[in-house]
Amino acid sequence: MKKNDSIELKIEDMGVDGEGIGKYEGMTFFVKDAVIGDTIRAGITKLKKNYGYARVQEILEPSPYRVKPECPLYARCGGCQIQAMDYRQQLCYKQKKVRGNLIRIGGFAPELIDSVMEEIVGMEQPYRYRNKAQFPIGADRDGMPVAGFYAARTHNIIPVEDCKLGVTQNEQILGVVLSYMRENGVRSYDETTGRGLVRHVLIRYGFTSKELMVCLVINRETLPQEKKLVDALCKIEGMTSISVNINRKNTNVILGEETRTVWGSDYITDQIHLRDCDHDFALTDTAIAYHISPQSFYQVNPVQTEKLYSLALSYAGLTGRETVWDLYCGIGTISLFLAQKAGKVYGVEIVPQAIEDARSNAALNGITNASFFVGKAEEVLPEFYEKESRKPDADMLHPDVIVVDPPRKGCDEKCLETMLRMKPERIVYVSCDPATLARDLKILCGGGYELRKVRPVDQFGHTTHVETVCLLSN
Ligand code: SAH
C-alpha cells in the first residue's frame, strides 16, 4: 500500500471533525466528505504507521443517510462539515460524540453514561437558523469586491451571498454593500498587503423583534460616501442599527475595539421566550428582552437557545430562595432567567462591554436581584471566596447552584477547584465542546460530585459542533 493507491472503503464511523472512517487491510483511513454507510473508492493521500488519509474518488454505493445538501457550495466552503448527511443521522452522530468523549476523556463508565444521558434535543428546521453572520469581504480576479466564506482551512474567499444557515436578508444586505463598493470605488481589504478598506460585514437579525443590524468592519476611520450606503441600507425592512467598526490590525480577530453608529440605534433588541408547552423539560413561561450590540456575545441559534436555557433552568431546580452563580455569563442571558426563579444571582464575565449590557438588560427587565462582576471566572470566584471566608458569618460561602457556560476551551482548573470548595448543591454545566466538558467533569466528579443528567442540544445543524447541558450534584 502506498500514497496515491486507490482502495475500496466501507465507511463505518465518523470522526470528531465529521470525517468518514473506514478500514482497509487493518489500517484506519480518514476520509473528508464521506458519510457513514458509504462504500467508496478512495485515493490515499497520506500514510502513517497504523492509519492514513484518503479522499473520495468515487461513491460506489451511497449511504442510506446521504442526502443532497441544500447549499451548492457545500463541498468547497469550510462552514458545514456534515450537510450531506441526513439530519436525523447528524443528531445520532452528535449524541454518540458526546457519549464517546465522556467515556474516553471523562473516564466515566459506559453504563453510567447510558443511565444519565437523555436524547439530544434536535431542531425542527435545520436550515436558516442563524441570527448572526460575519461575511469576509475580498476581491475577485478583476479586483471587484466579493463577499463569502473561507474555504476549509484557508483564507481564500468563496463567494456565498446566501448561506443556507443564515437568514435571507443577508443576501439583500450584501447586495447593497457590494454595489455601494463597486459604484464608489471602495476597495476590499487585502490581508496580505494590509491595504483596502472593507474587511467584514457583520449582520444580526432579531428573530422575535425582526430588527436588523449591519456593521461594516473597516480599516480606517470613515467610509467614503457613507451617506449613499446608509440611504440604501436603511430602506431594508427592519433595519434598526447601522455601524462601522474600526479594525486596523493585521489579525484574524474580526472586530476592532471601536464601533461608531452611523444610523439608528447602537443595538438591536431581541427576546428569548421560554414556554412551558413545547418540551418536557420547560417548567416556566417567561420572556426576557436583550439589547445586543455588535460586540456582544449572543447565542446564534435563537430557537434552540430557548430549549437550551429551559433545560439549564430546569436542571438548576430553583424555588425562589437560592443563591446562584452564573459563570461566563456574557450579556446575562442565562443569569436573568435564573434571577426570576432565585433569591440572588451573581454573574461573572471577562468582557466589560458584555457586563455593561448585562446590567442594562437587568434594568430593562426590571430585575434587581442580579449582580455582575467583570473579570476572569478563575480570578473573581477565588477572590470572592477568600474574602467571604474571613467574615464571621460567611453565609455566602456556599451557593445553592453554580451554572457555568464557558467557551470551547472549558473552565480553568482554578475555577473548578474553587467551585469544589464552595460546595454548591448543584452544578449545571453548559458546554459547547464535549472534549473539554469531559475533562472538566472528570475533575468535578473526582472532587465528590456525581453526574446526574446529560443532554445534548443541537445548536449548530450541519456542522460537527454540539452543545451539552449537564447536571451534577453531591
Ligand atoms: N452564558 C452566555 C455566554 C456564553 S459564551 C450566553 O449563553 O449567552 C462564553 C462567555 O464566556 C463569553 O461571553 C466570553 O466572553 C466569556 N469568557 C471567556 N473566558 C472567560 C473567563 N476566563 N472568565 C469569565 N468569562 C469568560
Image (cartoon, rainbow, N blue to C red):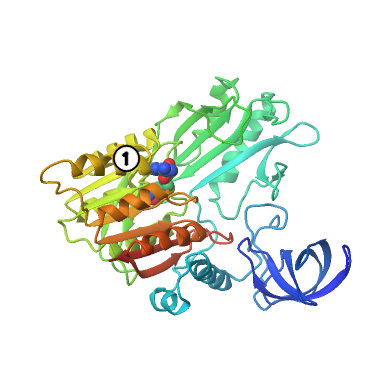
**Disc 1: which residue:** 380
User: Residue 252 appears in which quarter of the rendering?
Assistant: top right
Give amino acid for label 1.
Answer: Val
Q: Is residue 428 left or right of residue 27?
A: left
- Residue 243, placed above or below residue 416: above
For disc 1, does the CB lie below 8 Å from ligand 1? yes
Quadrant occupied by the C terminus: bottom left
* Between 129 and 379, the one nearer to me in the picture: 379
Residue drawn at 69 percent across, 68 percent down:
20
User: Residue 365 appears in which quarter of the rendering?
Assistant: top left
- Residue 166, placed above or below residue 212: below
User: Residue 228 appears in which quarter of the rendering?
Assistant: top right
Q: What is the number of callouts on the image?
A: 1
Estimate the x, y position of residue 326 in percent, counting from the top left.
31, 49
Q: Taking the image as drawn, is residue 413 in sight?
A: yes
Estimate the x, y position of residue 423 in percent, counting from the top left.
25, 57
Element class at badge 1:
helix
Q: Taking the image as drawn, is residue 211 in sight?
A: no
Quadrant occupied by the N terminus: bottom right
